[in-house]
Image: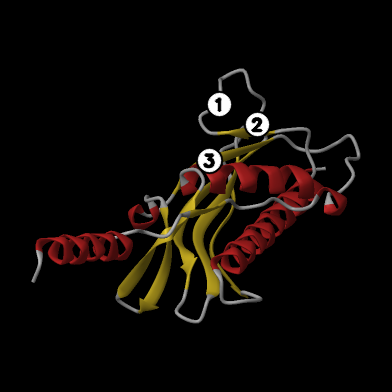
Amino acid sequence: MRPTTAFLMLGLTLVFLAGCGTTRPSKFYILSPIPAGESVTATGNEPAIGLGPVVMPKYLDRPQIVQRAGDNQLLLAESHRWAEPLANNFIRVLAENLAATIPVDQVAVYPWSRTTRVDYQVSVDVMRFDADADGNAVLSTDWKVQETESEKIITRKRSTFSEAALATDYAAIVAAQSRLLAAFAREITGIIRSATRVSD
């Protein structure tokens, strides 16, 4: 083999290997709150809500979107990532949803200052927030609502929501997860509204 031909073949081989090693560009996703058009109008006598602490499972503390391949196996989507830490996004969107569905002017997020008025505290322990092998989004939480002044626990329960994604891609899965957060917020506000009516 002539030197020129050998160098040409070596160059083509290096180009091929470089192409094989190229990773696909990442796509980034974010949870969305309840649309503004679905917000409940304030009446002027809404309670002040404190959200937190909210505890997320460690397996979700990563930039990749997590999907289950079975009962004991997780898949990490290297090319499909959260645009910010999932815990931060989860808490912010849940706070926005609570403010929209109670409604209140503002929901204080834990930790809040001692001077912040909080009538009811919502604490959440997230057990699961991912999608199964079929793309169905699942949110499972242990949570409680507590009256801050009396420290009376209004409710303590475990809630599980599931939502079928409308497609098999990650954008559809994240959209389904956003709808789960909206459903969760509505359940919380239903409890708080009932407690407020009783106290009135």
Q: Name the residue: 43% across, 69% down.
A: 67
Q: Which residue is mark 3?
A: 52
Tell me: residue 138, above or below residue 60: below
User: Furthest-top residue in view?
Assistant: 115
Residue at image position (88%, 40%) is 42
Q: Nearer the viewer, mark 2 or mark 3?
A: 3
Say if mark 1 contacts mark 2, CB within 8 Å: yes
Rendered image quadrant of residue 176: bottom right
The x and y percentages for residue 136 are 55, 76
Left or right, residue 104 beside residue 57: right
Amino acid under label 1?
Answer: Trp
> Compared to 131, does 27 lie above or below?
above
Instruction: Please identify the quarter of the rendering in which residue 66 is found.
Output: bottom left
- First reached walking from the N terminus: tag 2 or tag 3: 3
1 or 2: tag closer to the N-terminus: 1
Tell me residue 7's x, y (percent). 16, 60
Residue 102 appears in the picture as rendered: no
Which residue shows up at 83% across the image and 49% down it? 39
**Residue 194, located in which quarter of the rendered image?**
bottom right
Q: CA distance from mark 1 to mark 2?
A: 9 Å
Amino acid bearing label 2: Val
Which circle marks residue 118 in the picture? 2
Please give the label number shown on residue 112. Answer: 1
Amino acid type, residue under disc 3 in the picture: Gly
Give the left or right position of residue 141, taking residue 30 as reference: left
First-in-chain label (1 vs 3): 3
Say what secondary structure mark 2 lies in.
loop
User: For numbered disc 1, what is the local secondary structure?
Assistant: loop
Where residue 166 appears, as percent x and y from the top left, is: 66, 76
